[in-house]
Image (tube, helix red, strand yellow):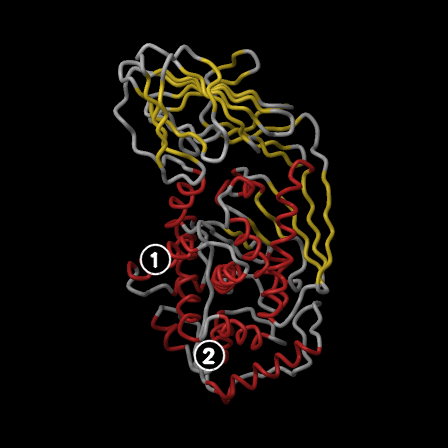
Amino acid sequence: MLKEKFPGALLALVVVAVLGVASLAYAQPGKGNLTVYIDVFENGNASVKIVVSPGDKGFVQLALPRFEKVYACGGSASGYRVVNSTSGAYFYFNSTIYFAEKGSSLALCYNFPYAVLMSGSRGWFMSPLLWSSEPEVVVYVKLPLVKRITYESPSSVGVSGNYRVYVLSPLVEQYIGNRVVVEYDLQSSTPVDTILYSSGGSTITVKFPVYYRSIALKVRDVATSAIAELSLIAGLRPSNVTFVFYLPERSMGGISALGFVMGEDVNAGGKGPVNLNLALIRYAPGYLETTVIHELVHVYLGAAGVEANDNTRWFHEGMAQYVSILVAKKLGVNISEYESELNESAASYYNYTGGKIGFIENWPSDAVKEGEAYLASYYVVHTLATKYGGENFVKRVFATLQGRHITTTREIVNVLSQAAGTNLAPLFREWGFRDVEDWTPSNAKTPPSNSTSTPSSSSTGNSRFLIAMIALLAVIFIVTYVVNAVVERELRIAEHAPV
């Protein structure tokens, strides 16, 4: 499967910025305490009540939400003051509560949407960020419709009425820092709804658990705009694209695996559904958009004839990441910080390796190395695209792919050289690639103008576009481009694995 996940070097950045894991520095612990009550309703939304006491310090530091109203809902404090400051967590403030009396207490309440995500017969809970300056945070969680708990982190320390009780502290191992995570079986399956939408010759289908129509509508809208842009870039248009959702369970890659397309679906001409992590509903703006576009690029590459296997994966991932950023910006999505961090991380990794990044020619199975492969793949594509024309280079790459069936790195480098109008094989050898051959205009393979690479048919306008692009190749002599992988996204390409 071609799975979009975050490269290792960016994973910590994304988890901190988006989810706020361990994003604040610990203050000196005092004798205060912090207790949290989370009541989840049957629709998955929750209410949160935090009871704080300053102990001897006279103040408590904790994370409070930026976009939900926080209000006092109990306690004995006669006077207090809340000071909010920015933190590395997009959805949270680093808040300090100063008490007029050290022995008093205060209860703060707020709403917490999508505390539990449900799909099929499964439920997945992740608490809000529960960072605090206190040495321990005691968390009471009431979950709806639980049939059987299959995983929890940290492990529950007991049950109190309808609540499962957890303790968060630096001494307790946690799957996601400063969070309680629970996976469980539901007492009954969650109903599914479907959105059908046709635009510009493409039918978009979004299948979703009934509680999440808002994210389904957003996926439809992003996909509609993205398909219009990608079709201009690729010179082809898929007739049907289907999106489905899955839960961020550990078996599916957790919160870092944002989406995937099955390799066999790519190899069948880009058919089959695009799978999206339902946790995207809780991510910062920009991640849903770039994930949808990223996975669509895999579909387009499959439609253009690029097979999904371990030898071509770097091209799939590099292209998907680079083009997703390109198209997201064209759609007006603000991803400047994400892009700059990715560029910096990819360049740093390239320098760290001394420029030897050819290991991606055979996609690694090791999780750490795989994260590095995403950065290396993106570096290759970004470097070539930056040097040889950006979007126009990508268009020439797709034009050159028309009518071919690409299964190897050697063929990809040939395509890139032809699109660039120059021999890129020496550069790839310098990067450490081995299975490459030199390209000259005389051995260029120009497909017939009426050939198609996928069940997605090309219109007369597309044929003219291809002819124009091929003519442009003969005149310009410009250079090359390669592909990228995702940012806290680690995609896996294998013929029978998700990409």
Q: Amino acid at mark 1?
A: Glu
Relative to 498, residue 351 above or below: below
* Residue appearing at x 46%, y 82% in the figure: 421
Quadrant of the image occupied by residue 168 = top left
**Residue 75 left/right relative to 406:** left
Which one is closest to the eye, mark 2 or mark 1? 1
Mark 1: secondary structure: helix
Q: Residue 144 location, x and y as percent?
A: 62, 23
Q: Residue 430 location, x and y as percent?
A: 34, 72
Q: Residue 174 location, x and y as percent?
A: 41, 30
Crowding at dot 2, Cα within 10 Å, few <14 / some 14-19 / many 20+, comes out as many
**Residue 33 left/right relative to 486:** left
Q: Nearer the viewer, residue 107 or 140?
A: 107
Q: Nearer the viewer, residue 454 or 50?
A: 50
- Reading the image, the residue beneath label 1 is 344
* Residue appearing at x 44%, y 72% in the figure: 435
Which label's residue is closer to the chain start, 2 or 1? Answer: 1
Q: Amino acid at mark 2?
A: Ala
Q: Nearer the viewer, residue 216 or 372?
A: 216
Relative to 292, residue 80 above or below: above
- Reading the image, the residue beneath label 2 is 420
Quadrant of the image occupied by residue 21 = top left
Q: Residue 139 location, x and y as percent?
A: 46, 20
In the rendered image, which quarter contains the C terminus? bottom right
Relative to 452, residue 333 above or below: above
- Label 2 and label 1: CA atoms lie apart by 25 Å
**Residue 234 left/right relative to 343:** right
Mark 2: secondary structure: helix
**Residue 329 left/right relative to 12:** right
Quadrant of the image occupied by residue 339 = bottom left
